[in-house]
Image (cartoon, rainbow, N blue to C red):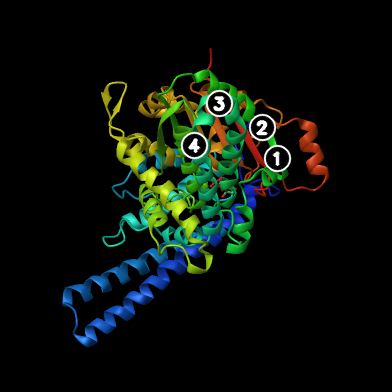
Amino acid sequence: FKPPYPPYDPQDKSGFSYATVLKRWPVIITGIIDHVHRLIHDMTMEAKRLAESGEDTLEHVKALKDKVEEGKEIISKASRLKYRMARDQELEPIPEDGDVDVDTYNAELANLATTHQNTWFTAPWLFAECYLYRLFRSYFNETRRWRNFDPFFAQKEDMFKHSATAIYQIATSMHELEHEKERLKSNPDNLLLLFREMIQMCLWGNATDLSLLTHLKPSDIEDLQTVLGKDTQLARQAFILKDDQEVMWEHIKTLGGSGKRCDFILDNAGFELFTDLVFADFLVTYTPYFSKVVFHPKLFPWFVSDVTPTDFESTITSLLSTTFFPETLLPDTRSTAHLQEMVMRWRSYLEQGTFVLSTDITEVNGQKVDGKAMVKFWTEPWPYWNMKERASQLWGWLHDSDLVVFKGDLNYRKLTGDAMWPISTPFTTALGPLAGTFPLLSLRTNKADIAVGIPQEIADDLDRKGENWRVSGKYALVSFEPRAG
Ligand code: F6P
Ligand code: MG
């Protein structure tokens, strides 16, 4: 499938893509350099202390020293990358590092070279950004002692810790629902209001991704996280520029019976993942329809804050730990008990297979599959419209789903190919051949130029008011596309 419009790229200096290559990526690369630098400084000190005190074996000291040397190598590669990026030099082939998709990326690079779109300020934004995170991966893969290191893990954890206030509030709201459970389940119309609250919580949970919020303080994040409760939702309603919530609810009601499956194509770890889990919990615990939710993470650190399988597991552990959140943010013991109760339920869902991580899938349509190999598609640079050809097993899996929720901005860019569609293009058109394959819901706060399904007048009006509505993260889209036929 080839859309009638090219993808966004940084050649247009007024686009967000240009600002990204010029300013945001260098900040992210510098963040990696600083982080590794701090770690190797601590390791050097530790090696010195051990050697002097004779406390530990020589092997341990040697291992630390080796790790320091490899860390220096990583820093020098990242610094070189920053230098080359600022000078609009070529994207270099990814080295053969024994991990997924080296050939995929390098073949596309060679392809872009034929049209001279293989430098940092000429390459399509979507491709270049995916390539960047795969390239970072190779820096760590090429070492012995940093191989599985996630340079963003500490940042993700730290931000998650600062989400405590909103997390406890949501846990208490969910606890209060306990008494309503039967009444809600027995009459789907009672569920609609709650359903809207859940969707919006999950939607605004996407406002806090770390690749965009390079400049925010934890207190700003807290403001963004005030997401549950009718008043907040009413106030935020005006910022949802395309709102398919009711259409989608009609779809869910037609599902009938129980035993349905929902798939979540995850975006960010931390608070957003927490809201995804709450929504998933709502679907299986409070609606009569769903009995299984499958979560699709990324195989390696991606777009700073995206969920990896490790993040997924540590989220559950952290939420159950009594020492994870800073003491200053802890509410009364009632709320802590509410959180425990909810997350213990999630843990039992994971044990029973009600909640599943897609990397653990072993069979699709009666055929054995390797879950890990199947989900590598999410860290490839491709738009989703050719999913059937590029990732047939994954496509087969999603084809059987009763609802596939795509979280976040990057998933939206991939759903629409990040192409320069006119704003009023119907969502279904921008999806290309993926439209109608399975019931598809995209929940996205706007953090990139692309947007479709919005009347031209509304866009013009926002532009006239000088709103930075395409990229500020303040506006959002709830786009639903049903299964065809
Ligand atoms: O545009 C900002 C940005 O960092 C994009 O580069 C990327 O598409 C997106 O935000 C990541 O956001 P999300 O976590 O919502 O996918
Ligand atoms: Mg993300």
Q: Earlier in the sequence, mark 3 or mark 2?
A: 3
Q: Please report contact status of discs 1 and 2: CB closer than 8 Å, yes or no.
A: yes
Label 4, ligand 1: CB separation under 8 Å:
no
Tag 2: residue type? Asp
Which dot, 1 or 2, sits closer to the camera? 1
The residue where tag 1 is placed is 237
253 left or right of 62 in image: right
Instruction: Look at the numbered disc 2 and give the secondary structure of its residue.
Output: strand
- Could you give the CA–CA distance between mark 1 and mark 4, rounded to whole angstroms? 21 Å
Where is residue 345 shown, x and y percent of the image?
Answer: 39, 43
Q: How far is mark 3 from mark 2, CA to CA?
A: 27 Å
Asked whether disc 3 touches disc 2, contact meaning CB atoms under 8 Å apart, the reply is no
Real-space Cα separation, disc 4 to disc 2, in angstroms:
20 Å
Label annotation for residue 282: 4
Cα separation, mark 3 vs mark 1, equals 34 Å
The residue to which callout 2 is attached is: 243
Residue carrying label 3: 2
Between disc 4 and disc 2, the foreground one is: 4
Of residues 162 and 232, the one drawn nearer to the viewer in this rendering:
232
Name the amino acid type tagged 4. Phe
Residue type pointed to by label 3: Lys
